[in-house]
Image: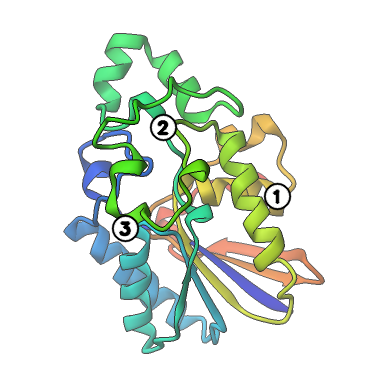
Amino acid sequence: MSYLILVRHGQSVWNLEKKFTGWVDVDLTENGQSEAKKAGQLIKQENIKIDLYYSSFQLRAKNTLKIIQEELKDFKKVISAWELNERHYGALTGLNKDEMKVKLGEEKVHQFRRSWDLRPDPLDKKNPYHPLNIKTYKEIPSEKIPDTESLKDTYERVMKFYSKEIESKTSENILISAHGNSIRALCKHLFNLDDNEISKLEIPTGNPLLIELENRKISSCKYLDQERSKDLLVF
């Protein structure tokens, strides 16, 4: 038996401003820091020894994990993987979600946010929000950096990394700090969700999802902050 803990980063500055964030490297709000601190406290109450820590390349996920480790008094090295980054929202990046609902219609924006294989228009490579122009990603080969992504694209890169680097570690307790869509991608695989079910899955910020595994199969799972839990569809 082992545990996998999935944590979406705490509220970010652009979460608060209702902007499409994607690969733009924004930090946590004060509320996001508080969410991360509570996440660490809730994990500590479970008395689970974490063997491996993973994070995306992005500041909001890294700082969430840093705060969690401070609460756990556990400062093991974190393995950072760009494959765990948030979905790239293409030309929607930096735009306000409410304003885009007025401009494009609520249904179209919902499709862009949650449909399985619909990509927004690509983001111009000269745009300052393009990952090619963000220092955080300078170590990633340019040919691997997307201009836009669907949830399917995000799923494929997340699962390629997870299958190669994490899934075989069946005896170790693992914590992953990532993002709404990269965690949604992992949940699609772990819970065997179809393309329609995955679009309905809500991932709350800063609320650890504790998954108990036996022989790579889920035996139980729960959000640790029950007051902020979301429907897991399958449990």
Does residue 171 appear anywhere in the picture?
yes
Residue kind at label 2, given as amino acid type: Tyr
Q: Residues within 10 Å of mark 1 (few under 14, many from 20)?
A: few
Residue 202 in view (yes/no): no
Q: CA distance from mark 2 to mark 1?
A: 22 Å
Rendered position, 161 above or below 89: below
**Pointer 2 or 3: first along the chain:** 3
**Residue 46 image offset from top left, x and y in percent:** 51, 81
Cα distance, mark 2 to mark 3? Answer: 17 Å
For badge 3, the amino acid type reads: Arg
Q: Position of residue 160 (x, y in %)?
A: 67, 53
Task: Note whether 150 is above or below 67 in the view shown.
Answer: above
The residue indicated by pointer 1 is 189
Q: CA distance from mark 3 to mark 1?
A: 24 Å
Q: Mark number for residue 86?
A: none
- Label 3, secondary structure: give it: helix
Residue at image mark 2: 89
Which residue: 40% across, 57% down? 227
Q: According to the image, label 3 marks what residue? A: 60
What's the amino acid at mark 1? His
Spot the residue most to the left: 30
